[in-house]
Amino acid sequence: MNASAPLTAADFKSDLKPIWCPGCGDYSVLQALAKALAELGRPREDIALVSGIGCSSRLPAYTNVYGFHGVHGRALAVAAGLKLARPDLTVLAAGGDGDGLSIGGNHFLHACRRNVDMTYLLMDNQVYGMTKGQASPTTAPDWCESKLTPRGTGVSPVMPLHLALAAGVNFFARGFAGNPNELARLILAGIIHPGFSVIHVLSPCVTFRPEQREWKKAVHAADAEPASVPAEAFARFAADDGFTTGILFAGDRTPFMPSRGGTTSVATIAQGFAA
Ligand SMILES: Cc1ncc(C[n+]2csc(CCOP(=O)(O)OP(=O)(O)O)c2C)c(N)n1
Ligand code: SF4
C-alpha cells in the first residue's frame, strides 16, 4: 500500500475471513463500516472498535483498526472508559440486541444518558444468534421457533428508538444491512455527530430467523428531516413499525467529558487504599 494514498474500505478490513453464516446481514455491516471509516479519513491507529459477545460482536476481528472483543454486554462500558482516557481517538462499539439490550441493557441506558462522544452499532436480528436461536429483548412476543419459548415470550419487545430517546440519546439512526451504502452514510453521520450516537442496524439472522430475508420489502426511508427534540421524535415515531430508516433523531446535547486535572496512576489509587 502507498503510505500517502488515501485509505480505502478494503484497508479497514483485516485478513481474517468471517465465519458468519452465508447470507448473514453482518457481512454488509462490516462492508458499510469499512466504507464509513474510509470516508472518515482518519488513520487506522486513531480508531478503536469495542464489542461484547455474539456473532455480531465478532466485528472487530474483521476490521483493521484497534479492536477489543470483550465480555458479554460490557462493550459500552469499555468504550466509554477508552474514550474518556483517550479523547483523541474515534471510538466505536458494536454488538447484538442480546448483548446490548439484555445483559448490557443497563449500560445502554447509561451510555445514552451520559452522552460520551462515541458511536454504537446495535446489530439487531431479534434473536440470540451465537447461542443458537433463543428469543432476545427485541423478539416479537408470538415468535415460537425456540424450544425455550415454544409459546412465544408473551412480553412486549424493547423498542431501541423509544428506549434510547427516553434515556437521552443524542443521535439515533436506523439502517438496514441490505442497503450498505446508505448504512455507511448513517455510520459516518453518527461518528461525526458529537456525543453518543446509536446506529440501529436491522441485520438479518438468516439461520435462525430466515423470514428476516423479507425485511428488504419492509424497510422504508424516513420522509422528514431528523427530529431534534425528544418530544418531537416520540410524537413522530410513537406508532413506528420499526422499519423506518435514516437519521431519526439528532440532538444538540454537549458530550460528557470530565475536566481532566492530570491523570492518576493505578499505583497512586492503590496507595490510597493502603493508607
Ligand atoms: C456472561 C455471559 N452470559 C451468556 C453468554 C452466552 N451468550 C453468548 S452470545 C449471547 C447472545 C448473543 O446474541 P446477540 O447479542 O443478539 O448477538 P448475535 O449472536 O445474535 O449477533 C449469549 C447469551 C456469555 N457468553 N456470557
Ligand atoms: S447464526 Fe445468525 S447472526 Fe450468527 S452468523 Fe449465522 S446468520 Fe449471522
Image: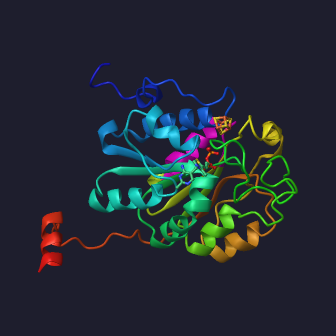
**Res. 241 in view:** yes
Q: Nearer the viewer, residue 257 or 130?
A: 130
Q: How many marks?
A: 0
Q: Seen in the image, is 18 located left or right of residue 68?
A: right
Residue 122: percent from the left, percent from the top?
59, 52
Residue 223: percent from the left, percent from the top?
75, 55
Q: Is residue 217 above or below residue 137?
A: above
Residue 31: percent from the left, percent from the top?
55, 32
Query: On the image, which quarter does residue 142 sit in?
Result: bottom right
Residue under the image location 79 percent in, 66 percent down: 156
Residue 94: percent from the left, percent from the top?
51, 49
Q: Which quadrant of the frame does ligand 2 lie within?
A: top right
Bounds of the magenta segment: 175-190
In the rendered image, which quarter contains the N terminus? top left
Residue under the image location 53 percent in, 66 percent down: 170
Q: Which residue is situated farthest in the bottom direction here?
A: 275
What main secondary structure does the magenta stretch of the protein show?
helix
**Res. 43 in view:** no
Residue 178 falls within the magenta-colored stretch:
yes
Which color scheme is applied? Answer: rainbow
In the rendered image, which quarter contains the C terminus? bottom left
Q: Nearer the viewer, residue 134 or 183?
A: 134
Q: Which residue is situated farthest in the top direction here?
A: 1
Residue under the image location 50 percent in, 71 percent down: 110
Residue under the image location 83 percent in, 60 percent down: 141
Q: Is residue 224 above or below residue 216?
A: below
Q: Seen in the image, is 130 located left or right of residue 191?
A: right
Q: Is residue 27 above or below residue 242?
A: above
Residue 179 falls within the magenta-colored stretch:
yes
